[in-house]
Amino acid sequence: MHPEFIKGDGFLVKVIRTGRRKTVSVRVQEGRVSVAVPKSLSDSRIEALLARKARWIKEKLLLQSAVEPEKSREYVSGERFTYLGRNYRLAVESGKPVAVKLRQGRLWVRVPGGHNNPGKVRDALTRWYRTHAEQRLREKTEHYAGVIGVSPTAVGFRTFKSRWGSCDSRGLVQFNWKIIIAPNRIVDYLVVHELCHLQQHNHSPGFWKCVESVFPEYKECREWLKRNGRLLQI
């Protein structure tokens, strides 16, 4: 019997039908999606289920995909840059004033000299990433602080050499702005991690219980960051 596949929203799903199953189970493993279903379940019911689970499936696929190391940057059109886990091709133009925009699926950069001025392209991109990181991280911090029930005294941003965030006894929470390159769920995990330190200034079982109460899949996110963190570069 040939394997049966159903096309999801941007992903392919292997359907496993069995007479021994009464419930439906969706798995995302090693970048592949499968669904085990009762033998009699119709394709339309399976498609409806996959549509409801599409966001969850996409997040799992993104978390399981490794960030590929980039070759030495030249900051020219066609190079790939990642923002919140999604890849965008760089489009460099020459002109003034300096500008960076996400437009039509591309990361568009305008600087004097264009391709002949890679340092300016890099600087413009760095400012754009940092500005967007600060905005997104402030929004996420406010949201998750309400969920956890904590109140940071301030939120700051730094270029840490070997860490992604910090929280001190005064309630100051700081983030490495480069985390904005990672998938959205990784960014969320980092915010929750640092905010939970406002309750537990250690990595005790109580601390991880706080993280898990908001982020049940925190171990997967933590491992992703350990595995791919060094590759989050502009």
Image: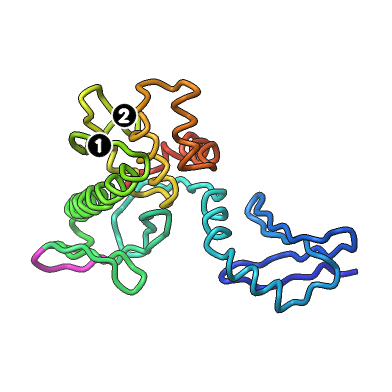
Identify whether 12 is placed above or below 167: below
Q: Identify the amino acid type marked 1.
A: Ser
Q: What residue appears at the point 52 percent right and 54 percent down from the top-left corner?
A: 62
| 126 is within the stretch colored magenta | no
> Which of marks 2 and 1 precedes in the sequence?
1
In the rendering, at what x and y percent does residue 211 appear? 45, 35
Residue under pointer 1? 151
Magenta stretch: give its range.
Answer: 92-97
Q: Is residue 213 left or right of residue 61?
A: left
Query: On screen, 17 above or below 209?
Result: below
> In the depicted view, which residue is nearer to us: 147 or 227?
147
Disc number placed over residue 198 in the picture, else none: 2
Q: Position of residue 65 (x, y in %)?
A: 55, 50
- Direction left: furthest residue: 97
Q: Amino acid at mark 2?
A: Leu
> In this orientation, which residue lies closer to the viewer: 222 or 123?
222
| Residue at image point 65% right, 54% down | 28
Q: What residue is drawn where x is 33% and y is 74%?
A: 104
* Residue 65: assigned label: none
